Image (tube, helix red, strand yellow):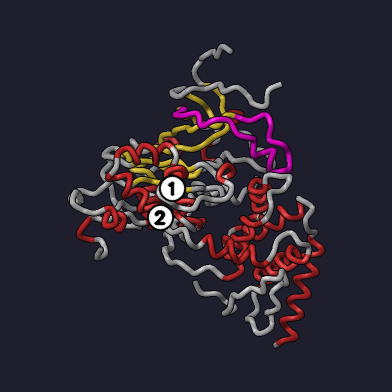
């Protein structure tokens, strides 16, 4: 079974890229959001990790760290019944339209 | 820290930030985050001020905090025992602000390097890190390359960071697979007997507290 | 009925990690599955993340151990030193005893 998150010992000769990039604004805010949300019925860390682990292998490898964490956050919020995927899709589409209209 | 949309004020009244106009497009994930944030604020789950305040707070913890605690442990054997047995309590003792929910904060364990053992910390499954002591992890710690290679080729990874150890020294990799977090206490370098705690803290780099390198030698430290 | 499973192992016990290919969330990496190691420490008992990840209670709590493996045994063509070790936190339900110790309750 493919578990792309279970990374220990994967074959790679890739050297460690030691460059650092300042976090984007939305990444910082996502990190903050995780601390701000009231504790839910579920253990959010475990639910969030499960969400990240369900990312298909071909996407996991090419997604950035905070992009995966966003998937984890969305899993947590939907599992807890706080938001639905449809609401998020709709709001994201609205924001995108608003941005395009302003260009 | 720079922000992509160039301003970071909050309206304080819980209104979602209206300022998508004029921002560069955030891309799929940035937009999706903004959607989630806007919905949570609309539903009263949290407020914009809370998010902004938490974002500002999380930047106050840096590796220098961990370095100061380790420097204190180097000079004060009794503090060192308290630090090893409960790093969060020791942090509180030195006046650092602790997380609001200490009970739910993952426990941190100190791995002490000595003449025989050198530790290296990784989280192969997801990138867990002792952020409560050290702040945000470096990008490389979270990289797939580090997560793959640290367990299988620790000496090769350390070599890339400039550290080569004799074979007689055990390189001990710690994979933090459960909810425990680990911080390395590097060895105190020789020739530092006359240094002040603040000078010692300058030798203790973030990388040495992960284990990819050792503490700096006194003659290589930045000017105190 | 207790909310915790009793610890079965002590420091020094030799154990084998199960090799199960489980569905779903688990915190036992494949690179140690099926391998033999030595218990170094009992951390305590914690709620099982494999259940928590799906909204379960995680009960009964499972003992969590720090287990040591020899690196040359884990990796074919290990490039480091013979004395190098890997330590990892593993839950009891993933461990099987190797030596024939009977635990009396």
Q: Give the foreground label among 1 and 2.
A: 1
**In the image, are marks 1 and 2 on the same chain?**
yes
Query: Looking at the image, which residue is at 41% across and 63% down?
Result: A18
Dot 2, how many residues are within 10 Å of its Cα: few (below 14), some (14-19), or many (20+)?
many
Residue C15 shows in this picture: yes
Which residue is depicted at the point 78% across and 62% down?
A: B43
Seen in the picture, residue B191 relative to B172 is either above or below; the reply is below
Per the image, the residue denoted by label 2 is B65
Q: Is residue B71 left or right of residue A81?
A: left
Q: Which residue is mark 1?
A: B91
Instruction: Give the position of the C terminus of chain B as an image quadrant.
Output: bottom left
Quadrant position of residue B217: bottom left
A9 part of magenta stretch = no
Where does the image place residue A77, in percent across and percent down from the top left? 73, 55
Q: Residue B121 in the image: x percent, y percent?
A: 43, 47
Residue at screen point 57% across, 80% down: B6
| Position of residue B135 measured from the top left corner of the image (x, y, whole percent) | 47, 57
Q: Chain of mark 1?
A: B
Label 1: how many Cα within 10 Å (few below 14, some 14–19, many 20+)? many
Query: Magenta region: which residues?
Result: C39-62
Q: Earlier in the sequence, mark 1 or mark 2?
A: 2
When asked about the image quadrant of residue B152, the answer is: top left
In magenta stretch: residue C58 = yes
Q: Is B41 displayed left or right of B78 in the figure?
A: right
């Amino acid at each position: 079974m493919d578990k792309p998150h279970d990374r220990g010992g994967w074959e790679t000769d890739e050297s460690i890229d030691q460059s650092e990039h300042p976090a984007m604004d939305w990444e910082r805010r996502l990190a903050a959001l995780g601390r701000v949300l009231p504790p839910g019925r579920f253990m959010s860390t475990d639910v969030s990790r499960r969400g990240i682990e369900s990312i298909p292998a071909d996407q996991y490898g090419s997604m950035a760290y905070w992009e995966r964490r966003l998937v984890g956050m969305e899993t947590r919020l939907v599992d807890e019944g706080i938001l639905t995927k449809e609401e998020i899709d709709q709001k994201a589409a609205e924001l995108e339209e608003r941005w395009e209209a302003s260009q | 820290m720079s922000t992509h949309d160039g301003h970071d004020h909050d309206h304080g009244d819980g209104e979602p930030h209206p300022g998508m106009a004029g921002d560069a497009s955030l891309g799929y994930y940035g937009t999706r985050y903004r959607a989630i944030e806007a919905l949570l604020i609309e539903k009263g789950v949290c407020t914009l001020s809370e998010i902004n305040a938490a974002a500002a707070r999380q930047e106050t913890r840096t590796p220098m905090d961990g370095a100061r605690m380790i420097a204190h442990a180097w000079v004060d054997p009794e503090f060192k025992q308290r630090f090893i047995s409960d790093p969060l309590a020791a942090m509180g003792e030195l006046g650092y602000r602790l997380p609001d929910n200490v009970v739910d904060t993952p426990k941190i364990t100190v791995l002490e390097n000595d003449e025989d053992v050198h530790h290296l910390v990784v989280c192969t499954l997801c990138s867990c890190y002792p952020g409560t002591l050290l702040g945000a992890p470096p990008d490389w710690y979270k990289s797939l390359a580090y997560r793959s290679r640290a367990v299988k080729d620790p000496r090769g990874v350390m070599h890339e960071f400039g550290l080569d150890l004799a074979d007689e020294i055990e390189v001990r990799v710690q994979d933090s697979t459960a909810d425990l977090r680990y911080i390395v206490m590097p060895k105190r370098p020789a020739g530092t007997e006359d240094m002040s705690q603040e000078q010692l803290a300058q030798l203790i780099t973030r990388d040495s507290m992960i284990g990819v390198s050792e503490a700096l030698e006194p003659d290589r430290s930045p000017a105190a | 009925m207790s909310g915790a499973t009793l610890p079965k192992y002590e420091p020094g016990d030799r154990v084998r990690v199960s090799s199960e290919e489980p569905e779903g969330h688990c915190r036992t990496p494949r690179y140690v599955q099926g391998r033999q190691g030595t218990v170094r420490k009992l951390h305590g008992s914690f709620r099982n993340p494999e259940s928590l990840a799906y909204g379960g209670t995680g009960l009964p709590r499972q003992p969590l151990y720090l287990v040591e493996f020899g690196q040359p045994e884990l990796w074919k063509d290990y490039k480091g030193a013979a004395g190098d070790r890997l330590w990892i936190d593993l839950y009891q339900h993933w461990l099987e005893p190797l030596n024939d110790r009977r635990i009396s309750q």
